[in-house]
Image (cartoon, rainbow, N blue to C red):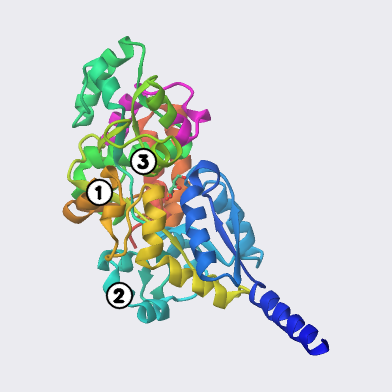
Amino acid sequence: MLRRLLTLFAVTAIGLAAAQSQIEIFSWWAGDEGPALEALIERFQELHPGIEVINATVTGGSGVNARAVLKTRMLGGDPPDSFQVHAGQELIGTWVVADRMEDLTFLYEEMGWFENYPQGLIEASSTADGIWSVPVNIHRSNVMWYVPAKLEEWGITPPASWSEFLTVCPAIQAAGVTPLALGENWTQVHLWESVALGVLGPDDYDKLWTAELPFNDPKAMEIWDVFGDVLACTNDDAAGLSWQQATDMVVGGSAAFNIMGDWAAGYLTTTLGLEPGVGYGWAASPGTDGVFMWLSDAFGLPQGIQNREATVEWLRFIGTAEAQDIFNPLKGSIAPHLDSDLSLYNAYLQSAAADWQNNRVVGSLAHGTVAKEAFASDFATVMEIYLATGSAMNAANAAQAIATQVGLGQ
Ligand code: GAL
C-alpha cells in the first residue's frame, strides 16, 4: 500500500514537473485577430502537454499599443518569453541593435530552414551577426477590398490606377457612398505606402528606403498630392475607426473600397464567414498590379528569459510547415515555409501565393519590413503634420528631416 502511494506520489510529481514549464507568448492578436494564434497554441499544447502557453495579448491593430508595452518590459528587464514582431527592420532596429535577442542561426541549421525558407526572407531577418526571428507568415499590404455585388449595383470596377480612382470618386460620392473607407492613424500610413507604390512604381519606391530618392524630391512629393486627393474620398470619422470598422463599412455597403493588408481576408472569412470571390473581392491597390508589398509576422528569442528551452520548442514548432498551415489559412496570410500545402488555403490565399511567386516584391513601411525602425515609428508624426497642415511640402520636408536624423539607408 505504502509503495503504491509512493509510486502515485512520484507519478503525480513527475506530471506536475512536466506541466510546470510555462511560456508567455506576447502579441497584438487579440479579439477577432485571435483565432489563428489560438489554433496554433492549441496544436502546440497537444504536442507538448508539459509546456503551458500563456497567450498574452495587447489589443490594437498593427501593434501600436503592444509595441509600447513591449518596450517598457524589455527595457525593464522583464521580457516575455517570445513576442510577435515584424521580420526585418522593426526587430533589427530595436532589440537586435540593443543586443537583447539571441541569434537563431542554430535553429535554422538544426531544422533545415536554410532549405525551407525563401532566401530573401532569411536575409531580411538577418544582420551580419545572426538571424533574429522565425517568420510565421507572409502578409500582403497592397490589397484593395470590395464587395462584388455592390460594385455591380453601382456600375463600377476596381480602379487600376489612382487617377482612375479619383475620376470615379465623385460619382460614388454622389450615390451617397464613401469611395474609400479609412481608419485610425496607422491605417492612414498603410494607405500612404500603397499610394507611394502606385505613384512611384517599385524601383523608385525601393529608392526611398535606400535614401537614393529624397522625400522632398518632386517625384516623392507627388505622393502627398495624390494622397491628399485620395483622402478627400474617404470618411470623415477615420481617426476613430479600427481597421475592422473600416472593413465593416465596405461589407455593409456604406463604402466602396478599402485598402488594407490581407489580415482583412482573415477577418472577412474567419470572423465574418464570407466566401472569397463571392462575399468579398480583391485587387492589387491602384497602380500596383504585379507588385507584392510584403511583411511578415515573426517571433524571436529574447536574452535572459526564464524558460528558454520551452521557448525554443515553441520556435521550432512555429517554423514547421504543419504549424504554418494551421495558422495561415485562418489568419489570411500565406506560409513562408516552402513545403506548405496550398490545398488547405482558400481562393484568395491561393491567388496571393501565386502573386508572391510571380510578382515583383517590395517591403512595407507601415509594418516594419523596409525602413529603419526609428523612421517607421516617427512617420506617424509626419502623417499628423500632413493631416494638420494639408501641405505636401511640410510633410515631405518632415519625412526627409527624419530620414536624415536616423540615417535612413545607411
Ligand atoms: C499587422 C500584422 C498583422 C495584423 C495587422 C493588424 O502589422 O502584421 O498580422 O495583425 O497588423 O493588426
Residue linked to disc 2: 114
Please tell me how crowded label 2 is: few (under 14), some (14-19), or many (20+) other residues with Cα within 10 Å.
Answer: some
Where's residue 367, x and y in %?
40, 50
Q: Residue at x 19, y 56 (%)?
A: 357
Q: Nearer the viewer, residue 282 or 128?
A: 282
Amino acid on which the number 2 mark rests in the picture: Phe
Please tell me how crowded label 3 is: few (under 14), some (14-19), or many (20+) other residues with Cα within 10 Å.
Answer: many
Q: What secondary structure is found at the residue carrying circle 3?
A: helix
Residue linked to disc 1: 350
Instruction: Tell us which disc is closer to us: 2 or 3.
Output: 3
Which of marks 1 and 3 precedes in the sequence?
A: 3
Please tell me how crowded label 1 is: few (under 14), some (14-19), or many (20+) other residues with Cα within 10 Å.
Answer: some
Dot label at residue 265? 3
Tell me the quarter of the image containing the N terminus: bottom right
Q: Residue at x 67, y 73 (%)?
A: 20
In this rendering, the answer to whether 122 lies above or below 346 is below
* Label 1, label 2: how far apart the Cα atoms are: 24 Å
Dot label at residue 387? none
Q: Nearer the viewer, residue 41 or 169?
A: 41
Where's residue 308, x and y in %?
57, 76
* Label 3, label 1: how far apart the Cα atoms are: 12 Å
